[in-house]
């Protein structure tokens, strides 16, 4: 019996121990388990850093192969050169005597050379003769080849898309006005304009605002921005200008599908074409990542005049000041690098007494927004905006684009509304029939942002920014056409937009604000129970109007893509996922 009782106690103890282990595992499981987004991001990082497996045969071949590193060119010794009216062929052949350099001179090389150079190499001399006398040279497999100063054909490779791209941004304030319009083609006629004509292209927008034979809208204020890209056509005309124009002897052949350009010209002209193409390709390949946040702030009491950017700028940059006249809603303004301060100086007077004096001076702050990213991030700016009102992030787009190419982001929906109506009357012997023709057009409701960057060599970015926040609602209109009354839902559109050109450094946060809106809300109140009694309920009800002001703020941060930019952005995304997972597990 004691043995049986002991066995049962051992069995119960084991069961309790097992239950505790299961309970502890259940409690610790969710805390240690990664989110699906974290696991997916870890897989992406691992795939990015994964090195492909190289077969053994390939590895051995690479080990046996000669080094692919560029070998230094022979003839690095320096010497002096002094010749006068020496035949070009004899000059080039005698230039490399005793240097260990191989030179091949084209049979058509002629003329004479006069030079006086000190402490130069073979490469330096050949470069001078090319620039001065036009003798082109090429170094390949340890041999310098000298060409005659005559027409040659050379093929250049250019990597770019074979596309024609046109982007138009239009910001306007329309004034209703009756005007005659004899353009029977309307928008269709304007649409057939040559895309190379800027005036006709922008005229397409005006044609869209006019009807075929009635009244139209006249722009009271309008800004139109055209971004047209026809890379290959402009490239051909530029190269033709570099070589002095296309003739029977000089020519330029462009093949966009293959990404090749064949140029027939003199050697020094080909050298100029080569330098131009290298610089052009570097420019068009520059890329920028645009991080944007479109924020709406419902202002608290005391901030009805708008956001106090001076207070926010001071908190972000530890007292850095924005200079007077800073227009944050316009072109971006300027940042004052110097902050006025007062220093106290102590000294001894003539009688030996210690005295003090306050002297106004200034200190270098580095600039408010220039230092913004060093102090914090956009998240910190949003936190400071919450001290002046309720902050709601309407959109947080992120897009990448290359140099001088427009990037467009749209988040919202298109809804159709009545924009035109006419009446067709059909008469016969017995009756007259009226049939209305209704024209519907889409109206966009949501957020739109288009940005065009121009990226300089030093990383500075000039941006054309055009944000639009629109809200379209139904508005019932009653009108009469012919003898019939119609009630149609028309579009009532509320819009907030700006169009500006700003300049920023790489990684600098651009702030555009000042787009304010006032909302009036009817607030009804009543006393419980008594307010529901008929006849006397009006005595116990209240009606009031509540006014609120909101300000739209656009935060934009350009990041010029460098060698490690994409890896850095990927790591930032991984860290963001990890922080989200940690916050989730701590709940």
Image: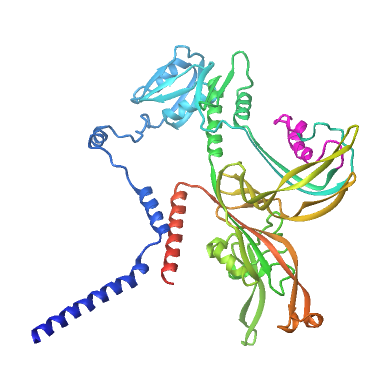
Whether 457 is drawn above or below 67: the answer is below
545, 453: nearer the viewer: 545
Whether 136 is drawn above or below 217: the answer is above
Is there any visible trace of residue 362 in the rendered image?
A: no
Per the image, is 197 magenta?
yes
Toward the top, the furthest residue is 107
Give coordinates of residue 497: x percent, y percent: 71, 54
Whether 316 is drawn above or below 427: the answer is below
Number of marks in the rendered image = 0
175, 79: nearer the viewer: 175
Q: Magenta stretch: give its range.
A: 188-215
339, 368: nearer the viewer: 368
Toward the front, the furthest residue is 430
Give coordinates of residue 171: x percent, y percent: 74, 48
**Coloration mode:** rainbow
Per the image, is 41 magenta?
no
Quadrant of residue 342 within the rendered picture: bottom right
> Quadrant of the image for the N terminus?
bottom left
Quadrant of residue 544 within the rendered picture: bottom right
> Quadrant of the image for the C terminus?
bottom left
Give coordinates of residue 194: x percent, y percent: 72, 29
Whether 494 is drawn above or below 139: the answer is below
**Residue at position x 59%, y 18% from top?**
251
Is there any visible trace of residue 157 in the rendered image?
A: yes
Give coordinates of residue 67: x percent, y percent: 30, 34
Q: Is residue 30 left or right of residue 231?
A: left
Quadrant of residue 250 within the rendered picture: top right
């Amino acid at each position: 019996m004691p043995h049986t009782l002991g066995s049962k106690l051992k069995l119960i103890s084991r069961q309790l121990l097992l239950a505790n282990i299961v309970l502890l595992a259940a409690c610790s499981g969710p805390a240690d388990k990664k989110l699906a987004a974290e696991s997916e991001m870890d897989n992406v990082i691992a795939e990015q850093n994964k090195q492909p497996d190289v077969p053994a045969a390939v590895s051995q071949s690479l080990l046996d192969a000669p080094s692919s590193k560029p070998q230094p060119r022979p003839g690095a010794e320096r010497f002096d050169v002094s010749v006068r009216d020496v035949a070009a062929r004899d000059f080039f052949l005698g230039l490399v005597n005793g240097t260990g350099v191989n030179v091949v001179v084209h049979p058509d090389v002629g003329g004479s050379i006069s030079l006086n150079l000190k402490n130069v190499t073979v490469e330096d001399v050949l470069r001078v003769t090319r620039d001065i006398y036009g003798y082109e040279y090429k170094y390949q497999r340890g041999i310098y080849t000298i060409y005659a100063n005559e027409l040659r054909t050379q093929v250049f490779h250019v990597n770019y898309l074979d596309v024609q791209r046109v982007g138009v941004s239009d910001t306007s304030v329309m004034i209703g006005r009756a005007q005659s319009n004899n353009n029977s083609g309307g928008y269709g006629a304007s649409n057939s304009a040559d895309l190379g004509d800027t005036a006709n292209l922008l005229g397409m927008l005006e044609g869209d605002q006019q009807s075929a034979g009635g009244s139209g809208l006249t722009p009271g204020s309008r800004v139109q921005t055209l971004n047209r890209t026809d890379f290959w056509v402009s490239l051909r005309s530029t190269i033709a200008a570099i070589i002095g124009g296309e003739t029977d002897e000089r020519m330029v052949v462009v093949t966009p599908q293959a990404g090749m350009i064949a140029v027939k010209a003199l050697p020094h002209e080909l050298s100029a074409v080569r330098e131009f193409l290298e610089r052009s390709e570097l420019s068009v390949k520059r890329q920028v990542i645009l991080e944007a946040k479109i924020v709406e702030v419902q202002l608290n009491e005391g901030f009805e005049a708008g956001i106090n950017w001076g207070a926010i700028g001071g908190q972000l940059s530890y007292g850095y000041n924005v200079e007077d006249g800073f227009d944050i809603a316009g072109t971006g303004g300027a940042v004052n690098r110097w902050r006025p301060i007062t220093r106290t100086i102590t000294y001894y007077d003539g009688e030996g007494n210690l005295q003090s004096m306050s002297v106004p001076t200034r200190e270098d702050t580095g600039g408010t927004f220039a230092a913004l990213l060093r102090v914090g991030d956009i998240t910190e700016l949003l936190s400071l905006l919450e001290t002046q009102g309720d902050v709601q992030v309407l959109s947080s787009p992120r897009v990448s684009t290359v140099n001088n190419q427009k990037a467009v982001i749209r988040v919202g929906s298109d809804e159709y509304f009545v924009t035109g109506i006419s009446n067709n009357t059909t008469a016969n012997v017995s009756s007259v029939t009226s049939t209305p023709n209704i024209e519907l057009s889409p109206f966009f409701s949501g957020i739109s942002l288009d940005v065009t960057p121009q990226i300089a060599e030093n990383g500075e970015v000039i941006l054309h920014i055009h944000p639009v926040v629109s809200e379209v609602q139904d508005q019932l209109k009653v009108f009469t056409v012919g003898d019939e009354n119609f009630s149609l839902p028309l579009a009532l559109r509320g819009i907030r937009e700006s169009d500006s050109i700003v300049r920023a450094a790489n990684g600098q946060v651009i702030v555009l604000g000042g787009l304010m809106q006032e909302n009036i809300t009817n607030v009804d109140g009543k006393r419980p129970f008594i307010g529901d009694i008929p006849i006397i309920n009006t005595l116990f009800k209240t009606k009031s109007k509540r006014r609120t002001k909101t300000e739209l703020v656009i935060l934009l941060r350009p990041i010029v893509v460098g060698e490690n930019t994409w890896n850095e952005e990927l790591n930032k995304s991984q860290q963001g996922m990890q922080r989200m997972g940690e916050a989730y597990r701590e709940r």
